[in-house]
Image (spheres, rainbow, N blue to C red):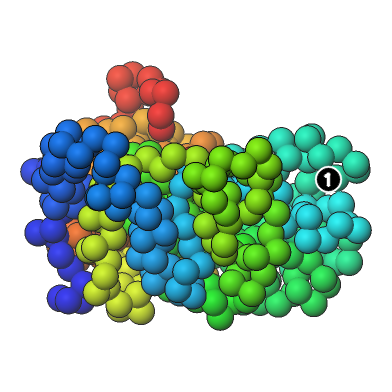
């Protein structure tokens, strides 16, 4: 565990125990100077020459390589850009085209709403009888039949942390002739992922959660290398064109994963992410996962020992849980606000989930015990029961 911990590499405010790195990772210390340098020396001095001279144009694939390692993807199979919601649309649009005789997109009711909304938008656009079908997470396996075109799942449930078996479900999808699309939003940088080994066709994810790329950091998309050159991008922007600077009047998809690029990359944001990803270069994901499970088990044991009002909402079996632990409490919003005011930052998800993320790069066992003591004080002394904690902010 000693090797995994690198607290000194992050900006962590005094008096804060941060259990929300699953939603927005903290800032790596090296980011501020590098971004300042990019602004001054690159944008400031180079102006438009920066696209070539500072390597801005290659950044989406370069950072994609860093992300590929963390999710067990083949080299050259991942590219960065846009936000995750757009990547859902892009991957799903490509996936349904691969199975032209079927009309059903299968997902589950534990999926993050934006993924379902984007699927609804695509279904509305396609017409022709397309349908989004959602079933309970535990019923997905049985719901995969020969009518399914695409199985679209988020591996780790954003509320409960429940984790799907990627290999098993991908195999089941393929056995029925369906295409598999995984959303790794709560997996990348949180659990061991073997994308190449899973054999899925598509994967997507974001980088502002466990990967610490900063608010608004771009998403990633993976397409299995043996079929990427057959994919017709629906978001056919100029930077996914084979020769963007030929300015042809017609779209011709670019080579390999480059075709999943759309428009001008967010260079400032990618610069921050690239620095954040440097931190991951020597992180062993198996070791990180083991440390995460250890922290979670400690948290669950101590909460259940000291805080009787909270009920575990996450799977008890750590092998089917991502890197977060959730508890239910009927006044969960107010309770979380009171806990946050005392320096333990987690978050709340409707209707009654208090959610805590575990990130072994900057949390240790002492932090867990200190956090539990504060949560116990708030809960056991009803400190949350004040009007000021019950006013809902725009972002929960
Ligand atoms: C966080 C998250 C999103 C957010 O999408 P953005 O477009 O980046 O805002 C989407 N899907 C899942 C599964 C998520 O966890």
Q: Position of residue 285 (x, y in %)?
A: 35, 75
Q: Position of residue 209 (x, y in %)?
A: 37, 50
Q: Indicate whether 182 appears above or below 394.
A: below
Local crowd size for mark 1, using a 10 Å CA cut-off: few (<14), some (14–19), many (≥20): many
Q: Split into 4 quadrants, where in the image is the C terminus?
A: top left
The reply to whether residue 294 is in sight is no
Report the side of 128 relative to 259 (left or right): right
Q: Which residue is more in the foreground, 353 or 186?
A: 186
Q: Position of residue 87 (x, y in %)?
A: 56, 48
Residue sitting at 43 percent across and 68 percent down?
Answer: 68
Q: Split into 4 quadrants, where in the image is the N terminus?
A: bottom left
Residue sitting at 71 percent across and 49 percent down?
Answer: 93
Q: Indicate whether 141 appears above or below 310.
A: below
Q: Which residue is more in the foreground, 166 or 320?
A: 166
Residue position for label 1: 131
SS for tag 1? Answer: strand
């Amino acid at each position: 565990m000693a090797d995994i911990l690198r607290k000194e590499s992050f900006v962590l405010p005094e008096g804060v125990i941060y259990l929300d790195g699953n939603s927005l990772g903290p800032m790596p210390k090296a980011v501020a100077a590098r971004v300042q340098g990019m602004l001054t020396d690159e944008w400031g001095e180079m102006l438009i020459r920066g696209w070539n001279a500072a390597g801005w144009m290659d950044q989406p694939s370069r950072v994609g390589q860093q992300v590929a390692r963390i999710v067990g993807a083949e080299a050259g199979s991942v590219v960065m850009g846009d936000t995750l919601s757009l990547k859902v649309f892009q991957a799903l649009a490509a996936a349904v085209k691969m199975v032209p005789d079927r009309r059903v997109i299968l997902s589950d009711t534990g999926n993050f709403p934006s993924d379902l909304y984007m699927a609804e938008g695509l279904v509305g656009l396609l017409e022709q009888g397309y349908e989004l079908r959602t079933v309970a997470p535990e019923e997905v396996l049985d719901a995969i039949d020969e009518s399914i075109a695409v199985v679209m799942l988020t591996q780790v449930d954003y509320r409960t942390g429940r984790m799907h078996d990627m290999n098993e479900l991908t195999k089941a999808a393929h056995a029925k002739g369906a295409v598999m699309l995984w959303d790794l939003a709560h997996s990348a940088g949180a659990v061991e992922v073997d994308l190449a080994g899973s054999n899925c066709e598509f994967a997507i994810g974001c980088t502002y959660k466990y990967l610490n790329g900063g608010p608004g950091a771009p998403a990633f998309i993976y397409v299995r290398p043996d079929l990427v050159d057959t994919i017709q991008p629906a978001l056919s922007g100029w930077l996914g064109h084979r020769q963007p600077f030929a300015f042809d009047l017609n779209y011709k998809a670019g080579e390999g994963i480059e075709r999943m690029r759309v428009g001008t990359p967010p260079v400032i944001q990618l610069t921050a992410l690239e620095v954040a990803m440097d931190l991951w270069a020597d992180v062993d994901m198996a070791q990180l996962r083991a440390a995460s499970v250890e922290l979670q088990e400690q948290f669950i044991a101590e909460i259940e020992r000291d805080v009787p009002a909270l009920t575990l909402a996450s799977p008890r079996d750590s092998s089917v849980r991502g890197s977060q632990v959730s508890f239910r409490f009927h006044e969960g919003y107010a309770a979380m606000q009171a806990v946050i005011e005392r320096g333990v930052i987690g978050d709340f998800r409707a209707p009654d989930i208090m959610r805590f993320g575990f990130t072994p790069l900057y949390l240790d066992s002492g932090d867990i015990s200190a956090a539990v003591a504060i949560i116990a004080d708030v809960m056991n002394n009803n400190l949350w029961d004040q009007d000021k904690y019950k006013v809902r902010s725009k972002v929960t």
